[in-house]
Image (cartoon, grey):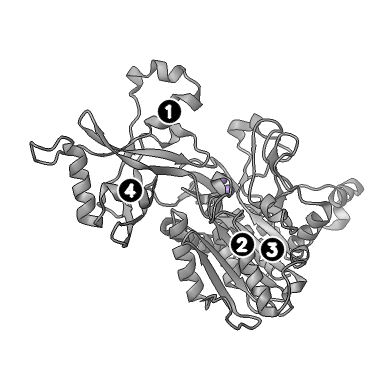
């Protein structure tokens, strides 16, 4: 329809009202911009990008594995490991790794650091089932590992499904061994058993939160005895003998290990139209991957661009590898030393996109959301002014000026984006790393991919949103 055929009211509504569009509607309407002269087949581009994302997801199910993958991709893109005190020039591409669990990638800008940096931050840990420090025991002919769940999990979702074991063990002899069992075709897998429904009347009458008890989330790992009449715990010894054979570890080495159970399955397309991806760990590897891809493509930027991929967000961002650690700030300090400037003052000139997934509106649980403020699957990257809970507790709540700045950046680059919120007020809530960064005097707002079934072992995202989140980071880094 041409402008002339629209009524005055239609034209005014177009001018005054705001409503998000889906990525695929925007493609059909020709809204997406391109830097190249030749037209881009956007759908093909989106699906191609998401195939690479799926490969990344399958290779990185723990923060350590994500760091390994990120280092591999960074090296291939010409990044080198940062050496404190080294001499670097604008345009140099560098990375620093924090204890194998976090990685900070940066490209030095043409302008001095004192003019501020562009920071994108995402987390690479996901909810999972960790081993306790003394996990191994046997009971009634079965051998188990005791666990402690990590992050906000709905416990019932983790029973009666195949689990893989991932992690590292630091042996008494000083060696460090990597453990991955359950990912290769033909590998054994593990599981947490559940009660049969025939005997489940009492369990089913309990609130969901109490039906599965944390101390009963023991993972089944064996049932075959070690053949020696003199041994009292034969099942346990059999499992230990196998672990010793393969990894050189003893029971004592469990206490110097980071071992976790994660879902076995790989990332898969969802739907007849393959428009979505189902996988373990979209939260927050979908933002980590898109932020990573964006920083890897930064060439000779105006301002220094820094991409922080951190650990521990799911348990409060505490500790040496969390966003509350000084690691990143020490790194920025050392970059400032190189330029002979003080890091005081550069933060106020900096800006940050805190990249974390958003709660997508789920029509099956409509009353948990404010439908008019929830992000919708497929409507592009979500920009979330505030998260938190109750009366806006535990959030940095981005200011009007910064929201306007981010809107300009996204609109200017033709990024399809939408707003989002944490859900119905007073129902619950949650936070991200945004407030920890904002506390350092850096303007910060949350952006990210809307997710269905967040924190479940099989989360769902829309491919269009994944791609738009990547484009948002590219536009941000280019400023
Ligand atoms: Mn998250
Ligand atoms: Mn989370």
* Left or right relative to 243: residue 359: right
Q: Which residue is mark 1?
A: 213
Q: Position of residue 99 (x, y in %)?
A: 48, 61
User: First in sequence: mark 4 or mark 1?
Assistant: 1
How far is disc 4 from disc 2 in space, using C-alphas?
Answer: 39 Å
Q: Are marks 3 and 1 in contact (CB under 8 Å)?
A: no
Closer to the camera in the image, 278 or 77? 77
Q: Which disc number belongs to residue 152?
A: none
Instruction: Kindly tell me whether mark 1's CB lies below 8 Å from ligand 2.
Output: no
The number of discs equals 4
**Could you tell me if residue 345 is visible in this image?**
yes
Local SS, label 4: helix
Classify 210 as above or below 27: above
Q: Which residue is mark 4?
A: 254
Classify mark 3 as within 8 Å of ligand 1 or not, answering yes or no: no
Circle 3: is it few (<14), some (14-19), or many (20+) Cα within 10 Å?
Answer: some
User: Going from the N terminus, do you reach mark 3 or mark 2 first?
Assistant: 3
Residue named by callout 3: 32
For the residues marked 4 and 1, what is the alpha-carbon distance in whole angstroms?
Answer: 23 Å
Is 182 drawn above or below residue 208 in the view shown?
Answer: below
User: Residue at point 20% right, 37% down?
Assistant: 223
Residue 425: x, y in percent? 71, 33
Q: Quadrant of the N terminus?
A: bottom right
Circle 2 Cα neighbour tier, 10 Å, few/some/many (<14 / 14–19 / ≥20): many
Residue 451 quadrant: top right
Q: Residue at x 92, y 49 (%)?
A: 8
Q: CA distance from mark 3 to mark 1?
A: 49 Å
Q: Which mark is residue 470?
A: 2
Q: Mark 2 vs mark 1: give the one in front.
A: 1
Q: For this view, does 385 lie left or right of residue 122? A: right
């Amino acid at each position: 329809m041409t402008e002339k055929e629209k009524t005055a009211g239609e034209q005014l509504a177009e001018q005054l009202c705001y409503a998000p569009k889906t990525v695929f509607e925007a493609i059909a309407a020709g809204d997406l911009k391109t830097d190249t002269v030749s037209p881009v087949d956007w759908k093909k581009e989106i699906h191609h990008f998401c195939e690479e994302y799926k490969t990344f997801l399958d290779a990185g199910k723990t923060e350590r594995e994500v760091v390994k993958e990120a280092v591999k991709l960074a090296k291939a893109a010409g990044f080198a490991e940062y050496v404190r005190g080294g001499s670097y020039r604008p345009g140099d591409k560098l990375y620093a790794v924090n204890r194998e669990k976090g990685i900070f990638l940066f490209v030095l800008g043409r302008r001095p650091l004192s003019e501020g940096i562009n920071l994108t931050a995402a987390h690479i840990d996901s909810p999972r089932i960790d081993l306790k420090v003394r996990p191994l025991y046997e009971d009634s002919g079965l051998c188990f590992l005791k666990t402690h769940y990590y992050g906000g999990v709905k416990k019932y979702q983790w029973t009666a499904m195949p689990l893989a074991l991932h992690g590292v063990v630091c042996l008494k002899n000083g060696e460090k061994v990597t453990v991955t069992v359950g990912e290769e075709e033909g590998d054994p897998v593990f599981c947490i058993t559940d009660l049969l429904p025939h005997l489940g009347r009492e369990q089913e009458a309990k609130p969901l939160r109490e039906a599965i008890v944390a101390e009963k989330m023991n993972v089944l790992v064996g049932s075959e005895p070690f053949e020696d009449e003199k041994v009292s715990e034969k099942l346990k010894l059999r499992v230990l003998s196998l672990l010793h054979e393969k990894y050189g570890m003893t029971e004592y080495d469990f206490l110097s290990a980071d071992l976790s159970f994660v879902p076995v399955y790989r990332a898969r397309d969802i739907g007849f139209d393959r428009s979505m991806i189902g996988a373990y760990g979209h939260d927050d590897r979908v933002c980590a991957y898109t932020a990573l891809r964006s920083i890897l493509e930064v060439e000779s930027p105006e301002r220094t661009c820094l991409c922080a991929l951190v650990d521990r967000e799911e348990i409060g961002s505490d500790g040496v590898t969390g966003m509350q650690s000084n690691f990143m700030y020490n790194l920025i300090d050392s970059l400032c030393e190189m330029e002979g400037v003080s890091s005081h003052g550069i933060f106020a000139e900096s800006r940050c996109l805190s990249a974390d997934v958003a709660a997508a509106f789920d029509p099956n649980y409509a009353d948990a959301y404010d439908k008019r403020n929830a992000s919708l699957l497929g409507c592009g990257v979500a920009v979330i002014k505030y998260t938190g809970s109750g009366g806006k507790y535990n959030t940095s709540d981005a200011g009007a000026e910064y929201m306007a700045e981010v809107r300009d950046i996204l609109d200017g680059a033709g990024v399809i984006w939408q707003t989002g919120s944490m859900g119905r007020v007073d129902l619950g809530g949650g936070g991200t790393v945004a407030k920890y960064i904002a506390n350092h005097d850096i303007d910060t707002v949350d952006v990210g991919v809307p997710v269905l079934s967040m924190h479940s072992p099989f989360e769902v995202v829309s491919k269009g949103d994944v791609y738009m989140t990547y484009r948002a980071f590219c536009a941000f880094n280019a400023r």
